[in-house]
Amino acid sequence: MASANFSRPPETWLGDAQRRLLLVLLLAAAALGLVGWLMPPNGPLYWVVLVAAPTVAAALGYVGGGMPVARRLDRLLMGRVRGGREAGWAPAHPALLPAEAREALERAVVPALLAQLASAARRAPAQAEPLQALLGSARDVMRQPQPPAEATGLLARYLPGMIASLGHGRRRDGLAEACALLEGALRGQAAPGLAERMDSLLPATPAGGRARP
């Protein structure tokens, strides 16, 4: 199976501009607080220090925010202490997830797939009858408080191939048979060799149909 191309996570949590802005605000505020705490508010010296201290602190924050040591501290705070040698992250394939997580994922994705199939069916009046029958059975399954895991698994596997058939106009000659086979499986009447027959009727898709090598 072809691996997906996932972008690497950012090297640091903040960019240089964001880090500089954060340090400018923090250091200037800290300087103002220290002046008010350490010096009585009287005399010209107080006002000179009150203006100069946050200005100098802000300048130090701006310069320090772009220094390499600030980037290393950023990585350290994010748990990346190997000098930027982060490994790219890729999510686990659904087949590798625990059964409970996989079933929850299928229950979440099937309603969206049914909505896409219904939208595609409106653009294919010749296939309306088998598609409407399948949609009715699938919605009955998904309305249950706890939809059967086997039924939701079948829908998650084969609905993308049906949507692709309607969207691209391919293999529509076998779509009616695929609808009938899937509807029978949802009703507990799965035909022998269901997986092989469905795979031959539907185009391969990343999310359903036949698995790509």
Image (cartoon, helix red, strand yellow):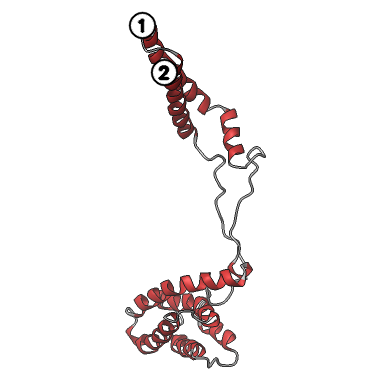
Q: Residue 41: name its quadrant.
A: top left
Q: Is residue 187 above or below residue 33?
A: below
Residue 27 or 205: which is nearer the viewer?
27
Q: Residues within 10 Å of mark 1 (few under 14, many from 20)?
A: few
Q: Which residue is found at the position 59% from the left and 74% from the top?
A: 211
Q: Is residue 207 visible?
A: no
Residue that lies at the very extreme toward the top in this rendered image:
44
Residue 177 locus on image (x, y percent): 47, 90
Q: Which residue is mark 2?
A: 36
Q: Residue 213: name its quadrant.
A: bottom right
Residue 62 locus on image (x, y percent): 47, 24
Q: Which residue is mark 1?
A: 43
Sequence order check, earlier mark of 1 and 2: 2
In the image, what residue type sits under mark 1?
Gly
Q: Which residue is found at the position 55% from the left and 51% from the top?
A: 7
Image quarter hosting the N terminus? bottom right
In the image, what residue type sits under mark 2?
Gly
Residue 155 locus on image (x, y percent): 49, 79
Residue 11 or 20: which is nearer the viewer?
20
Q: Is residue 51 above or below residue 130?
A: above
Please tell me the numbered disc located at residue 95: none
Q: Secondary structure at mark 1?
A: loop
